[in-house]
Image: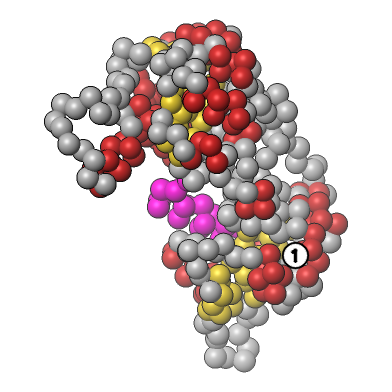
Amino acid sequence: MIEERRRRAGDQGAPHRPAIFIPQPIPETALARLEEIGDVTLFSSLDRRITPEEVLESVPDKEILFALGSIPYDDAVIDAATRLQLIAAMHPAAPFVDVAAATRRKILVTGIPNTLADTTAEFTFVLLLSTAWLVPQADRMLREGRWCQNQSMALLTTRLAGKTVGIVGMGRVGVGVAKRLQGMEMRILYNKRSRLSAEEEAALGAEFRELDDLFRESDFVVLTPLLTAETKGMVDARRLSLMKPAAILVNTSRGPVVDEAALEAALREGGIAGAGLDVFEAESRESGFGPRAGLLELPNVVLTPHYGSAARETREEMANRVVDNIELFLTGERPLDVLNPELYDEPSRRDERIG
């Protein structure tokens, strides 16, 4: 449902209130701030995604577009928004916004800082535990009345203590995962393009390994790298075949890092014991969001809907940073997180990430 949320000032001399469009609900703290400074149109449904047609119908008179949820703001949307001045995205890189098209029209695009590392690391730790302990499967068994025996052999899990975990991509998220695993009495291996210093390795209790060796030695492989041309498809059939039959793969990086067809085959054939996935090769509704159908059938897979930043506090921080950028723009100041700085005669941003 699309709602017009207006708090118009009664005084004829009141400052101009820009028309703002938000394509799905955002935290109330951020929404309230926007309603104080502009006339907000909000797509308020949580049970469905806004359609491209509804977006196009909503934007012609809008001056500011709030961008989030991978809802495409492509050339057609930007062209339809004839009064558009700013696209403010709740994402560090806003890959769902046609920044080039906006730049050609002299429309500023802002993002937010990549401040999700701690939350994503915490979620990755939770997904690792949930996958090892088959928490969703146990919940379903109990709810469906299929749990019949104490000390049962019906649902055996695996503990983390004493096992080896290999972390691929020891950036901020990988480091956060390693810190959380230090208390689990696990041996920690890692792979990174640029090896950590001896002091950093000692602080984390982590040992460097070449990628193939990491896959061979680990009982758990945790994927946290950026998606680049180098990392796309890095976990293919050959690399999966290096893993132990009892090993578990966890991916909170980006879906295309893993060849899902090869992963499904490895899980079905007993090449590995399980997987925990928060990201998938198909990452937009247009390309059929979610895991390949075969993964949905497997009892040894834990699947979550790419919600590794879904902590209430984190989402509030993200949304309010977007509002900070909007407020600065409306006062004539340079926003904090500009994605097309060439509009300020500054060098263009370059990023090796694919998305």
Give the residue type that dot 1 points to.
Val
Q: Does residue 161 appear left or right of residue 332 in this picture?
A: left
Question: Who is closer to the viewer here, 348 or 51?
Answer: 51
Which residue shows up at 49% across the image and 17% down it? 271
Question: Who is closer to the viewer here, 330 or 56?
Answer: 56
Residue 192's spot in the image, x, y percent?
A: 59, 18
Which residue shows up at 31% across the image and 21% down it? 158
Q: Is residue 309 magenta?
A: yes
Is 187 placed above or below 59 here?
above
Residue topped by disc 1: 77
Looking at this view, name the residue that lies furthest to the left.
150
Looking at this view, name the residue that lies furthest to the right.
104
Q: Dot 1, how many residues are within 10 Å of its Cα: few (below 14), some (14-19), or many (20+)?
A: many
Question: Start and end of the magenta stretch?
Answer: 307-325
Q: Main secondary structure of the magenta part?
A: helix
Which residue shows up at 66% across the image and 26% down it? 233
In terms of image quadrants, where is residue 128? top left
Residue 308's spot in the image, x, y percent?
A: 47, 42
Residue 75's spot in the image, x, y percent?
A: 80, 59
Which residue shows up at 49% across the image and 25% down it? 267
Question: Who is closer to the viewer here, 274 or 106?
Answer: 274
Q: Does residue 31 appear left or right of residue 287 in this picture?
A: left
Q: Does residue 39 appear left or right of residue 156 in this picture?
A: right
Residue 254's spot in the image, x, y percent?
A: 59, 35
Quarter of the rendering occupied by the C terminus: top right
Number of numbered markers: 1
In terms of image quadrants, where is residue 60? bottom right
Judging from the image, what secondary structure is the residue with disc 1 in?
helix
Is 264 placed above or below 44 here?
above
Residue 32 is at least partly visible in this image: yes
Is 96 placed above or below 126 here?
below
